[in-house]
Amino acid sequence: MATIKTIAIIGATGSMGSAIAKALSTNNNYRLLLMSNDQDKLVDLKIVLEKSGAEAYAFSCVKEASWEADIIIVATPYETEKEVAEKIREVATGKIVISISNPLNKGYNDLVTPPNTSAAEELQKMLPNSKVVKTFNTTFAADFMTPVIDGKVADAFIAGNNSDAVNAVSELVNTVGFNPIVVGDLTVSRTVERKQLLLI
Ligand SMILES: NC(=O)c1ccc[n+]([C@@H]2O[C@H](COP(=O)([O-])OP(=O)(O)OC[C@H]3O[C@@H](n4cnc5c(N)ncnc54)[C@H](OP(=O)(O)O)[C@@H]3O)[C@@H](O)[C@H]2O)c1
C-alpha cells in the first residue's frame, strides 16, 4: 500500500492552488493542508474537495499549514515568495518544496530574474535546508481539468537536485494525470521558466 503523503498548498484558493488541490483530491494517498488569505473561498474549496473524498484542512497561517506537510507547494505569485520562504524556512527543513512560479515582469514580455538564475534557484537559496523541485510552471491551471490533449497525456517538466525529492514529485505529477519528464538539476529551471515565457 502506498504511504499517505501530506501536501501543503500555499495560495490554495488561487487559480493554480485550487486546480492542484482539486486534481489531488480524488486520490486518497494525499492529505491536503490548504492555506489562503481568503477564508470564505477556502471553506467553499474545502467543501468541494471533501465531496471528492479528500481529507482537507483549512489554514490562514502559512507556517501552520506547512508544519505537518511532507511536500509544500508554493502557489503564490513570484514576488511573494520571499515573504512565504521566510515564514516556512524553519518548518520546511528537510522537506520538499515545489516551485511552480514563472517570474514574469508586469508586461509579461520578460522575466524579472537574470539569465544566470531562476525562480526555483532563488527559492532554494532562501530555503537552504529544503529540497526545492521545479514543476507545473508550464502547466496552465485549466490543464488540470483535462491533462489529456488530442489523445496525448500532457508533459510536466521536473527539475531538482535531490533524486528522492524528484521521484516523489514525479509520482505526484503522475497522480494528477500528467506525464512527468525529469529534465535535470535545479539550474534547468532557467530553461523551463524561459520556455513558458515564450509560450505566454
Ligand atoms: N495561472 C496559471 O495558469 C499558472 C500556470 C503556471 C504557473 N503559474 C504560477 O503559479 C503561481 C500562482 O499563480 P496563479 O495564477 O494561481 O495566481 P492567483 O490566481 O493570483 O493565485 C495566487 C494565490 O496566492 C495567494 N497569495 C498572494 N500573496 C500571498 C502571500 N503573501 N501569502 C500567501 N498567499 C498569498 C492569493 O491569495 P489572496 O489573493 O487571497 O491574497 C491567491 O490565492 C504564480 O507563481 C504563477 O507564475 C500560474
Image (cartoon, rainbow, N blue to C red):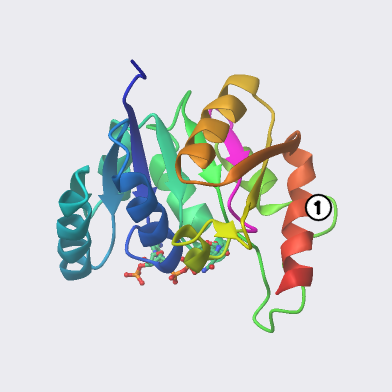
Residue 154 showing in the rendered view: yes
Across and down, in percent, residue 68 comes to 28, 30
Q: Quadrant of residue 8?
A: top left
At horizontal 39% and vertical 29% (from top left) the residue drawn is: 70
Across and down, in percent, residue 89 comes to 45, 37
Q: Quadrant of residue 124?
A: top right
At horizontal 30% and vertical 46% (from top left) the residue drawn is: 25
Report the residue that reaches farthest toward the front.
151
With respect to residue 1, does 102 lie above or below? Answer: below
Q: Is residue 194 magenta?
A: no
Along the line of sight, which residue is nearer the eye, 168 or 125? 168
**Residues in magenta, as a range:** 128-138
Ligand 1's quadrant:
bottom left
At horizontal 72% and vertical 57% (from top left) the residue drawn is: 193
Q: Amino acid at mark 1?
A: Thr
Secondary element at tag 1: helix
Across and down, in percent, residue 100 comes to 56, 53
Main SS of residues in magenta: loop
Across and down, in percent, residue 200 comes to 70, 74
